[in-house]
Structures are given as C-alpha cells and as structure tokens.
Image (cartoon, rainbow, N blue to C red):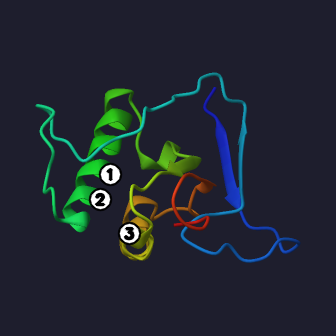
Amino acid sequence: MAAEIRIFNPDTLGKPLGQYSQIARVKNASEFLFIAGQLPSDKAGNLVAADDFEAQCRQVFSNIEAALKAAGGGFGNVVQFTTYLVHSQDVPKFRAFRQREFPRFFPQRDLPAEHPGDCGPPGG
C-alpha cells in the first residue's frame, strides 16, 4: 500500500519562516528511505564549482534527485529536509535558492518540513 503523505501548516502555528512546512504526516508507510547528506560533488567524487554557491546548490539537489530516482522515488516522496551549511553568510543565498527552486521540485503540494541543521536560523 502506498503511503499517504499530508504536508500542511495549521492555523494554530505561526507561518514558517522559510521554504518549509510545519508538519509532514505519513500514514500507512511500509518503507522509509534515508539519504546521506549530499555534497556538491559529481559522480566521480570531484568538487563542483568550488567558488560558486549557486552551482553547488544545483549539484547537491541533483545528487538528491539521483538518489531518490535510484530508489524508485522522486521529490514528491520527500517529507523532511535537514540542511547544513558551512558558512552562516550563505544562509540568505540558500534561502533565495529554495525560494526559486522548491516550487519546481514540489509543484503538486506544500513544501516538506525542515529540521534545522547547523549554521543560521531555521528554515534556511
């Protein structure tokens, strides 16, 4: 049986501070997929665009998408992200990337929940 995924922001909680939703509920899940943290590296393990934050974001999300596809899924199956950034000054750049790209990754539903990682405020 396929999992029922419901992602939402209840009226009883404040509006999310970034590109994420407050709650992700998964019912009837018979399987979970955990993807290791992804770095901006290509298939050969080479760092991509060492001085280009935007290109590195694109590579990381390309890697995430490849991992999802390898397991038979896609971004529509994602219910939570955890974000870790090396430098706090990259938080605004990452927020801008998410603001622009997440609607493309998640066109049919609300955005996944966010578990704030290191560096900067939640919802980066």
State the count of labels. Answer: 3
Left or right of 40: which side holds 99?
right
Real-space Cα separation, disc 1 to disc 3, in angstroms = 16 Å
Between 110 and 122, the one lying in front of the other is 122
Q: Residue at x 45, y 67 (%)?
A: 88
From the image, tell me which residue sits under label 3: 90
Q: Nearer the viewer, mark 1 or mark 2?
A: 2
Q: Residue 27, located in which quarter of the rendered image? A: top right
From the image, tell me which residue sits under label 2: 57
Residue 39 in percent (x, y) is at 30, 43
From this view, report whether residue 112 is shown above or below residue 97: above
Q: Amino acid at mark 2?
A: Cys
Q: Residue at x 15, y 34 (%)?
A: 43
Q: Amino acid at mark 1?
A: Phe
Mark 3 and mark 2 lie on one chain; the one further toward the N terminus is 2
Real-space Cα separation, disc 1 to disc 2, in angstroms = 6 Å
Whether tag 1 and tag 2 are in contact, CB under 8 A, the answer is yes
Whether tag 3 and tag 2 are in contact, CB under 8 A, the answer is no
Real-space Cα separation, disc 3 to disc 2, in angstroms = 11 Å
Within 10 Å of disc 1 (Cα), the crowding (few <14, some 14-19, many 20+) is some
Quarter of the N terminus within the rendering: top right
Residue 74 in percent (x, y) is at 40, 43
From this view, report whether residue 24 is shown above or below residue 13: above
Q: Residue at x 42, y 36 (%)?
A: 73
From the image, tell me which residue sits under label 1: 61
Q: Amino acid at mark 3?
A: Asp
Disc 1 secondary structure class: helix
Within 10 Å of disc 3 (Cα), the crowding (few <14, some 14-19, many 20+) is some
